[in-house]
Amino acid sequence: MPNLKHFKLPDLGEGLTEGEILKWFVRPGDTVRLNQPIVEVETAKAAVEVPSPYAGVVTELHHGEGETVDVGAPIITFDTDPGGVPTGAAASPTESLAAAVRIGQPAVASDTIPAQLIDNPPDDAAVEPGLIGGPAPGGRTSVLVGYGPKSVVAKRRPRVGAEAAVAAPVAAPVAAPTPGPAATTARPGVAALAKPPVRKLARDLGVDLRSMTGSGVNGTITRADVAGAAQGTATTAPSLPDLDPASRERRLPVKGVRKLTAQAMVASAFTAPHVTEFLTLDVTPTMELVRRLRTLPDYADQRVSPLLLLAKALLTALRRHPMINSYWDEAAQEIVVKDYVNLGIAAATPRGLIVPNIKDAGRLTLVELAQALRSLTETARAGRTAPVDMAGGTFTITNVGVFGVDTGTPIINPGEAAILAFGVVRPTPWVVDGAVAVRQVTTLSLSFDHRIIDGQLGSQFLADLGAMLADPATLLAWS
């Protein structure tokens, strides 16, 4: 008989309490394999694809796209034994429901399913087995779905009589987008063969991989296939909520990344006493070094920018002034000084401001730092930054110069002691050796927690940073 399983929304970050359903990748009637991505959820930190903990047929989606769901609430129900049939003479209403789902008919409301047929996890298993933080199958340490040694053997209940010849369930038909050069009609229940970067490209371009035939090895879908299919697929940009004609206003719900950012900034601004200092300097030598690095073979595939050299100089300055790389532990009434630097880079995304960080950035060479910066920014712009990549930051750079802004008074990231704003680099009249010349000039602004960093320490740190940017030979001498 049908074996129905509820899947509850797991904690996808560090103690998060809710998430918003951004997009369902499956529909009722779809056949799902183990670990197949089934839904994209936006938490207060990032958008995350959630894999299926079961293999079977989707019977019900409990929440629609755009809804906010509490962690631990059921979001989807599977039938993990869709081919199983009862041995009795007549099928119960619930069995008829499962059969209707298998042939793509509308499902009956979930409250009509007898409770004894739904396998509800106990209260201490709100997070499904195999996901981070959840109980592991067979008593193993908690692992990601599909990873780790196999400790239990799944057994399928035997079928009896003529019922054993029942055909496999047929998934509900999926509407295919306008086919491009590599597209065919949708193939319900058939998993598309494609690597994760190709799947991401398909989502960004609005291409349904299930409607495509790949040109790669063993039918694998390639980037070229997706790009070709996208030529015949119309895409639309997200729109603002409808305008209220009476008030001529739009109301945007505060949730997800923007909600967490607002809470963090309010807590920081009214907890840590901020002091901001400014330094305007000539960075012409740094800009010349940037141009020279771009010609070197080691940097041919990297994005060399002034931010790279600023980050390198910052890491050197933090070694010279370790108290800057710390935070105030209010509960313990201690100042915690870090011997490592997780360098955060503030990134503006469609979902709001996020601050992913480069782990142990102080140990990286200049080439490795360039690679890490490029990977961090590309991932953030694609909206695929994982929660772990935004945790544990120790110092943050916010590059307001990319927007043509000279400077600002940034708010310290919670759990850190300082943040640096990097302004735009402009050709500016500057006095050099008693004469006015056009030089490349920028402004740095440093906000710091005055409970930890006094004016002398903050000024010395900012002055050292400026000295290395004004003369890269100083950076080489201090590194």
Image (tube, helix red, strand yellow):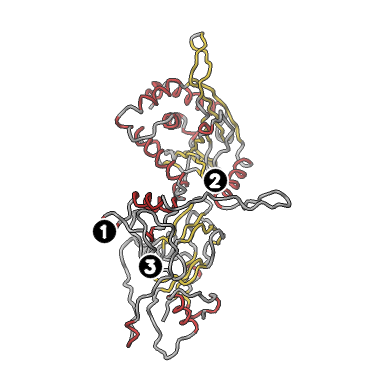
Name the spot of residue 349 as percent of width and height, x first: 51, 44
Percent x, y for residue 174?
43, 65
Going from N to C along the chain, the mark reached first, 2 or 1, is 1
443 over 249 or under it: above or below: above
The answer to which quarter of the image holds residue 157 is bottom left
Within-10-Å neighbours for mark 3: few <14, some 14–19, many 20+? many
Q: Nearer the viewer, residue 146 or 63?
A: 63
Q: Residues within 10 Å of mark 1 (few under 14, many from 20)?
A: few
Q: Nearer the viewer, mark 2 or mark 1?
A: 1
Q: Residues within 10 Å of mark 2 (few under 14, many from 20)?
A: some
Cα gap from disc 2 to disc 1, whole angstroms: 40 Å
Q: Residue 218 — which label?
A: 1
> Label 3 vs label 1: CA separation?
18 Å
Look at the numbered discs 2 and 1 and tell me whether their residues touch, using CB distance below 8 Å.
no
Q: Amino acid at mark 3?
A: Gly
Left or right, 211 with reference to 337: left
The spot of residue 93 in percent (x, y) is 50, 83
Q: Amino acid at mark 2?
A: Gly
- Mark 3 lies on residue: 189
**Amino acid of disc 1:** Asn
355 on left or right of 268: left
Q: Secondary structure at mark 2?
A: strand
**Residue at x 47%, y 82% (from the top left corner):** 96
Position of residue 352 relative to residue 465, above or below, is below
Q: Secondary structure at mark 3?
A: loop
Mark 3 to mark 2 CA distance (whole Å): 35 Å
Residue 110, given in percent of the width and then of the height, sits at 53, 75
Q: Earlier in the sequence, mark 3 or mark 2?
A: 3
Q: Residue at x 45, y 20 (%)?
A: 284
Find residue 235 and name its label.
none
Label 2: which residue?
Answer: 352
Task: Locate the N terminus and report the quarter of the image it occupies.
Answer: bottom left
